[in-house]
């Protein structure tokens, strides 16, 4: 994810045909490419598509009469996020995550609602996606119930089908004790085939998720914020305890994080609005010191800053797994609230807290 510039590609929409029957054709994929074809009833004229592991590579896909076609080069299976423009702006809208597989074509038709967008979609395409509609619903069920049985049953009913790989992440995160059972149902041809890297990455991501979840339970609201001393912009050590007596916002960010950067204008507004009552302490992560200092200058950040080096205990102490993460502390140094992502509710909370 650590890229330094947003990359936006405008992809021309292609009108595939005028009738829904076009989805019944026998799709043929291209080696080294993944194609997503859709017919959505949603009113938006564009969609935003991006790899989950690289949200800076954004593709704007145009719709015509509800139809769109998106093709991208792909060497390894990965997850893609599809969002409405509103959702991309952190406004009410829909977003879904689908599995992109090289050499395959995914189709989708229907309507995406904001709460459960995939519920209104029917998937199809090449052989990999034959059972994708059912598999997608099972992933959601595993997440909601924290029970892998439905995924286990599906894989047993479809032995040797690559679609089993899409369950690894959900089972690993929400019913990890049964992950090995799921993996043992997959023959070597799947575990060591073209889905190998995807499966292994899902296993690692699930382990990190479980560990993070366990750490989260150890830092409840009302607990004392762990003390730290880190290097400030002037090269001198800076301790969290020096801010005691004021409300403090610890803003975990990085110059590579597009969502972090996009939130700076609102943060500046609130910094000047409440700077007599609160302090913001920027916690730069994932940068070199040179890139950190350059980003602070480039974006003219007026609040205090410290550098969090790779491997710092701070990441574990504050349960940091996504960016931006904002931790709000009271004047007594206790944790009041943690907000992940650029969420308008963060500013609503500040208004209630500080007015």
Image: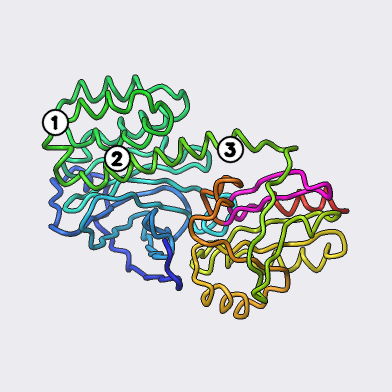
Residue 141 in sight: no
Label 2 belongs to which residue? Answer: 123
Tell me the number on the disc at residue 230: none
Task: Check disc 3: other Cα within 10 Å, few if <14, some if 14-19, many if 20+.
Answer: some
Pointer 3: what residue?
216
Mark 3 vs mark 1, foreground winner is: 3
As measured in the structure, the alpha-carbon distance from the residue carrying label 3 to the one carrying label 1 is 35 Å
Of marks 2 and 3, which one's residue comes earlier in the chain?
Answer: 2
Residue at horizontal 61 percent and vertical 47 percent from the top = 318
In the rendered image, residue 339 lying in the magenta stretch gets the answer yes
Left or right of 322 in this view: 334: right
Q: What element carries label 2?
A: strand
Classify residue 294 by image quadrant: bottom right
The stretch drawn in magenta includes residue 351: no
Residue 137 percent coordinates (x, y): 37, 31
Residue depicted at x 28% and y 22%: 152
Q: Distance between the residues labelled 2 and 1?
A: 25 Å
Dot 2 or dot 1: first in sequence order is 2
Disc ID at residue 187: 1
Q: In this view, does 59 lie above or below 250?
A: below
- Residue interval drawn in magenta: 324-344
Which residue is painted at 58% across and 76% down in the image?
293
SS label for mark 3: helix
The residue at 77%/63% (across/down) is 270
Could you tell which of marks 3 and 1 lies nearer the N-terminus?
1
Q: In this view, does 225 lie above or below 282?
A: above
User: Taking 329 as reference, is 43 left or right?
Assistant: left
**Which residue is more in the foreground, 314 or 55?**
314
In terms of depth relative to the viewer, which is nearer, 318 or 57?
A: 318
Q: Is residue 240 above or below residue 207?
A: below
Name the residue nearer the viewer: 82 or 55: 55
């Amino acid at each position: 994810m650590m890229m330094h510039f947003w990359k936006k590609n405008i992809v021309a929409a292609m009108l595939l045909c005028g009738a829904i029957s076009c989805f019944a054709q026998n799709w043929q994929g291209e080696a080294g490419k993944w194609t997503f074809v859709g017919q959505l009833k949603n009113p938006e004229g564009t969609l935003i598509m991006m790899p989950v592991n690289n949200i800076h590579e954004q593709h704007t896909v145009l719709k015509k009469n509800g139809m769109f076609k998106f093709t991208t080069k792909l060497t390894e299976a990965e997850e893609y996020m599809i969002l409405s423009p509103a959702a991309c702006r952190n406004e009410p809208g829909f977003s879904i995550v689908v599995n992109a597989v090289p050499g395959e074509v995914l189709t989708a038709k229907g309507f995406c609602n904001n709460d459960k967008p995939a519920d209104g979609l029917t998937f199809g395409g090449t052989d990999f996606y034959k059972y994708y509609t059912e598999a997608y619903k099972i992933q959601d069920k595993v997440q909601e119930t924290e029970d892998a049985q439905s995924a286990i049953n599906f894989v047993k009913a479809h032995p040797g089908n690559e679609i089993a790989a899409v369950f690894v992440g959900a089972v690993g995160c929400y019913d990890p004790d049964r992950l090995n059972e799921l993996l043992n149902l997959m023959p070597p041809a799947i575990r060591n085939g073209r889905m190998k890297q995807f499966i292994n990455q899902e296993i690692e991501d699930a382990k990190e998720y479980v560990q993070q979840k366990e750490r989260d339970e150890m830092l409840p609201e009302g607990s004392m914020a762990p003390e730290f001393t880190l290097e400030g912009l002037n090269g001198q050590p800076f301790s969290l305890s020096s801010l005691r007596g004021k409300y403090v916002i610890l803003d975990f960010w990085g110059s590579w994080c597009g969502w972090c950067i996009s939130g700076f204008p609102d943060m500046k507004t609130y910094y000047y609005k409440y700077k007599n009552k609160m302090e913001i302490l920027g916690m730069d992560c994932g940068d070199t010191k040179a890139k950190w200092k350059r980003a602070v200058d480039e974006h003219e950040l007026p609040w205090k800053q410290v550098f969090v080096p790779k491997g710092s205990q701070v990441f574990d102490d504050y349960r940091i797994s996504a960016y931006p993460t904002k931790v709000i502390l009271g004047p007594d140094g206790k944790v009041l609230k943690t907000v992940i992502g650029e969420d308008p509710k963060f500013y609503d909370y500040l208004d209630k807290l500080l007015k």
